[in-house]
Amino acid sequence: MNAILAVKQYITKMVDDCGSGMKVLLMDKETAIIVFMDNRVDGLGYPSTGIVSMVYAQSEILQKEVYLFESIEQPNRETMKHLKAICFVRPTQDNIELIEQELKAPKYGFYYLYFSNRLGMQAVKTIATADEQELVREVQEFYADYFAINKNLFSLNLPCCYQNMSWKHDKLDRSIEGIAALLLSLKKNPVIRYQHASENARYVADGLKKFINKEAALFDFRKGDVSPVLIILDRKEDPITPILNQWTYQAMIHELLTIRKNVVDLSHVPGINKDLEKLLFSGEQDEFYDKNLYKNFGEIGQNIKSLMEKFQEKSQRSQKLESISDMKAFVESYPEFKKMSGTVSKHVTVVSELSKIVTEQDLLALSEVEQEISCQTSHSNAVEMINKVLHNEKATDINLLRIILLYALRYEHHSGNQLQRFLDVLSRRDFPDRYKKSIQAVLYYGGKKSRGTDIFGGNTPLSITKKFFKGLKGVENIYTQHSPLVHDILDSLVKGKLSEAQFPYAAGSPVRDRVQDIIIFIAGGATYEEAHSVHNFCSTNQGLRVVLGEEVTSASQRATDGLKW
């Protein structure tokens, strides 16, 4: 199962099915493609990448005779009857109305209409009525209705899904549609399980069951020996993972610089080169990034050094143009040389900025405290460490909040709980009131009463206190003691030991054989660290395929600021 490949195959089929000839790609704000040249990002008036850009570079699509990229929402587009229009949009009411207007006053020769999810009969009738000139050559549903971040990670890009800790109806419907699209794109009709302790997880599971039953013909795939499993989790079961600082490359970039639909905005960095203000981080378009997604920070430094040495070697060769054959070879290799130059500049810039933040905020020391509080049991040691941290001048408010949150969750009912004393100390250094309020909100959201599992308990199958040491010195030992809950849930599921009481079936019958295909959706947001954990788990379990999904990728700043997870 590969989320990126599934979306990419849809886009490829759209373009290929139109045949030869010059084409324009019409998109909406969610499917839009960005222009990415020499590491600089520009869009169609949209702030970040869309579904297409997550998997396809503009240069790749240009090779398929797509020479123009337009927004269907832009009313003043030039009329070009010699172009075929490939229209790929979400099947929303607004987009149907825009297509209706487009067909009544067509700007292109022919139209091939593709929708990212189910298209209602009324919408089909509207399109047919508007197509008075009979220019529509194709109307199809291609279920690329999600953002494929990694091969094993997809997002629906839905922030602020909850009100009073319960689903907003429109966001619930969109989540169900997005998960259903993923299943259709992967050709899976799964057994559905959900977290019993979570109403939000049950709503998703029930909604998907109804969707699949209603669209039974779409889900009539050839059945394998073992049914795939879709399991719906709730972020509140593991409130720890989004709070912790992480030390793998992708997770660090998101935590410290923020990745929004594969784009990192560095425009706030003093003295940044204009060409490096907005950078695209996509494993499909950046081989170095793809190979180093899950490498720890120490390894990244060494790998970037090797990358720079290779570039310097190629650069020196390019200066020795002593014959016609030398010049010819240089011209032929120039695109690759230029791409490598952009890759080196991008990663050196980002790693330099990460290193600067790590040093300025003393993150190594603070992260060690986070891991100790999360994974150790001594309350007195935790209090001693926090007392030191509270007087660390390099500790920012958000990093102090992380540590206080971990303490509040870990020792929520401890007889010697000193949360109030810590808050009193923080008040003397002008700690933001909104952060103080978020501590109570997180305890309400993810405290012991709200969770179905004891994440700080003993040797239970779902305990995340289990430490894993990889036998290496330094960062791997100290800073990766914590293991996300999703790892233990996967382990129990694969071994057939996942409790049916805690994770009942919403659809399908119990799977008795070893599961091979698993889709996990975390209501409330997943983290890059959990994607890393899924990747590692699959690496050590041959033949297992897992895809992780979420509404929006969690970082601690968003997870604690107003509890928007």
Image (spheres, helix red, strand yellow):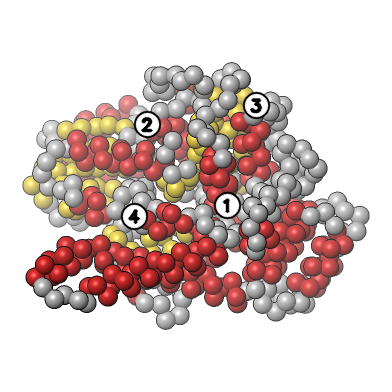
Q: Quadrant of the N terminus?
A: top left
Type of amino acid at the residue the image marks with label 1: Glu
Under circle 3, the secondary element is loop
- Closer to the camera: disc 2 or disc 4? 4
The residue to which callout 4 is attached is 285
Find residue 496 and name its label. 3
The residue to which callout 1 is attached is 529
The answer for how far apart the CA atoms under marks 3 and 2 are is 34 Å
The answer for how far apart the CA atoms under marks 2 and 4 are is 30 Å
Q: Which residue reaches farthest right?
A: 415
Under circle 1, the secondary element is helix
Type of amino acid at the residue the image marks with label 4: Gln
- Residue 88, how many percent across, how many down? 28, 42
* Mark found first going from the N terminus, 2 or 1: 2
Type of amino acid at the residue the image marks with label 3: Gly
Residue 283 in view of the camera: yes
CB atoms of marks 1 and 3 within 8 Å: no
- Closer to the camera: disc 2 or disc 1? 1
Pointer 4: residues within 10 angstroms few (<14), some, or many (20+)? Answer: some
Relative depth, front residue between 559 and 307: 307
